[in-house]
Image: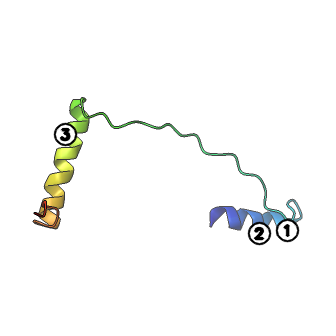
């Protein structure tokens, strides 16, 4: 929505073309792979399971 608003404003002011959206640079990002061997990864997974079980008790148990 912010990009669309900026484009509309720029087109209204005559600084941007109303027929073609401006190019927006890609956001900087970094990918982190989950690591089961790291203590922090194990702690996050344990906390997720605890909250999931409180929210949906028994919903994710294995079915025979």
**Residue underneath mark 2:** 8
Q: Residue furthest front?
A: 64
Nearest to N terminus: mark 2 or mark 3: 2
Task: Tell me if 10 is positioned left or right of 37 in this view.
Answer: right
Depth check: give the residue in front, 17 or 56.
56
Depth check: give the residue in front, 13 or 32.
32
Q: What mark, if any, has residue 43 been given in the picture?
A: 3
Name the element at disc 3. helix
Looking at the image, residue 36 lies above or below residue 3: above
Tell me the mark number nearer the camera, choosing from 3 and 1: 3
Quadrant location of the N terminus? Answer: bottom right
Tell me the mark number nearer the camera, choosing from 2 and 1: 1
- Could you give the CA–CA distance between mark 2 and mark 1, rounded to whole angstroms? 7 Å
Looking at the image, residue 11 lies above or below residue 38: below
**x and y, in percent, of residue 26 in the image:** 65, 46
Residue 57: image quadrant is bottom left
Q: What mark, if any, has residue 18 been given in the picture?
A: 1
The residue depicted at 25 percent of the width and 34 percent of the height is 36
**x and y, in percent, of residue 41 in the image:** 25, 37
Q: Residues within 10 Å of mark 1 (few under 14, many from 20)?
A: some
Task: Tell me if 57 is positioned left or right of 15 in this view.
Answer: left
Task: Tell me if 26 is positioned left or right of 48 in this view.
Answer: right
The residue depicted at 12 percent of the width and 63 percent of the height is 54
């Amino acid at each position: 929505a912010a990009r669309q608003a900026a484009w509309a404003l720029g087109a209204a002011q005559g600084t941007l073309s109303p027929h073609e959206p401006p190019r927006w640079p890609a956001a900087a990002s970094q990918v982190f792979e989950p690591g089961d061997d790291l203590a922090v990864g194990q702690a996050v997974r344990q906390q997720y399971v605890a909250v999931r079980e409180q929210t949906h008790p028994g919903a994710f148990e294995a079915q025979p």
